[in-house]
Image (tube, rainbow, N blue to C red):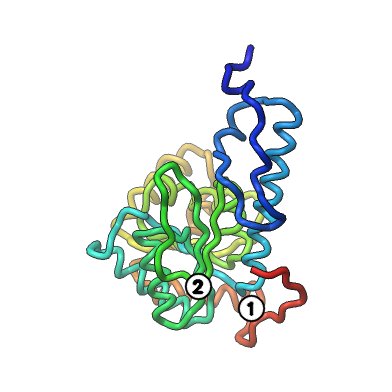
């Protein structure tokens, strides 16, 4: 099948201005539009590699994280905003670095709770056609063009995953983590859903539709904890992280190498 005129357009300049610096504005959809010329594909692949290096540099020394997912659409007036603040504060007091997508809504609430409790607050944002600005409660903010690079960063540094109510993005992140655990690509880290009323229909669908249809195993649902209590969620995370994965309370990891901000 012949390529369209857009596919034949000349390749843009290299997306990274300098090794390890914030990537440029090249749209991720160019990478997913189908086959291009080999030099074009090579430039895109190198840009993605540099985006990974940029993320590794920014996040290497943040310490043990818990990633919290949640909607960008629930503002400070919403009941779940307070829930986000509470879980962020509880995680910070338990000694975890709190990582979110870095945007508004429940991500902001979680970062705010962590910051106000004296913890380290991290945001991994994604560039979108409608600009998503970082929330004002971040100690470190890292921005990515590609969702898959961002997902790697949200998973790579975390010992547990907590999901507040959210939409398609939150569902995508929950199921991505669940697949990685199911297939053994990552360890059996805790996955906690906060908001029993919100998440119960999803869990029931998984039990009746997916387990009942034999497309997943019962264990794939049973490993997901659902609760209304931020304290219970964080206590479970803390216990599993310390007993199962060997984390201890102590000084932060010393920097063996550093390439600057």
The residue positioned farthest toward the left in the image shown: 77
Judged left or right of residue 239, residue 57 is right
Residue at point 42% right, 71% down? 137
Position of the N terminus, as image quadrant, is top right
Residue at point 52% right, 39% down? 214
| Label 2: few (<14), some (14–19) or many (≥20) C-alpha neighbours in 10 Å | few
Position of the C terminus, as image quadrant, is bottom right
Secondary structure of the residue carrying numbered label 2? loop
Residue at point 36% right, 55% down? 72
Position of residue 36 relative to residue 176, above or below, is above
Total marks drawn? 2
The residue positioned farthest toward the top in the image shown: 1
Judged left or right of residue 221, residue 78 is left
| Residue on which the image places disc 2 | 139
Separation (CA) of disc 2 from disc 1: 23 Å
Using the image, tell me which numbered label, if any, was put on residue 186: none
Q: Residue 66: image x %, image y %?
A: 53, 68
Residue 226 showing in the rendered view: no
Using the image, tell me which numbered label, if any, was put on residue 247: 1
Secondary structure of the residue carrying numbered label 1? loop
Judged left or right of residue 212, residue 86 is left
Between discs 2 and 1, the one toward the N terminus? 2
């Amino acid at each position: 099948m012949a390529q369209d005129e857009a596919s034949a357009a000349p390749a843009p300049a290299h997306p990274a201005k300098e090794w390890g610096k914030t990537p440029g504005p090249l749209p991720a959809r160019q990478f997913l539009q189908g086959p291009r010329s080999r030099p074009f594909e090579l430039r895109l692949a190198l840009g993605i590699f540099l985006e990974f290096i940029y993320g590794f540099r920014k996040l290497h020394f943040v310490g043990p994280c818990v990633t919290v997912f949640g909607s960008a659409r629930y503002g400070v007036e919403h009941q779940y905003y307070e829930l986000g603040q509470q879980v962020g504060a509880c995680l910070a007091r338990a000694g975890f670095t709190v990582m979110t997508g870095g945007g508004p809504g429940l991500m902001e609430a979680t970062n705010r709770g962590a910051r106000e409790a004296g913890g380290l607050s991290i945001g991994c944002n994604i560039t979108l056609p409608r600009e998503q600005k970082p929330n004002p409660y971040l100690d470190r903010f890292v921005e990515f063009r590609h969702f898959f690079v961002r997902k790697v960063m949200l998973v790579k540094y975390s010992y547990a995953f907590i999901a507040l109510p959210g939409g398609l993005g939150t569902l995508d992140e929950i199921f991505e983590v669940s697949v990685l655990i199911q297939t053994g690509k990552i360890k059996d880290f805790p996955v906690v859903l906060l908001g029993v009323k919100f998440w119960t229909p999803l869990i029931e669908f998984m039990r009746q539709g997916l387990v009942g249809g034999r497309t997943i195993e019962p264990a794939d649902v049973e490993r997901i904890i659902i609760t209304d209590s931020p304290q219970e969620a964080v206590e479970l995370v803390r216990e599993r992280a310390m007993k199962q994965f060997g984390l201890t309370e102590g000084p932060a990891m010393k920097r063996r190498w550093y390439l600057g901000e």
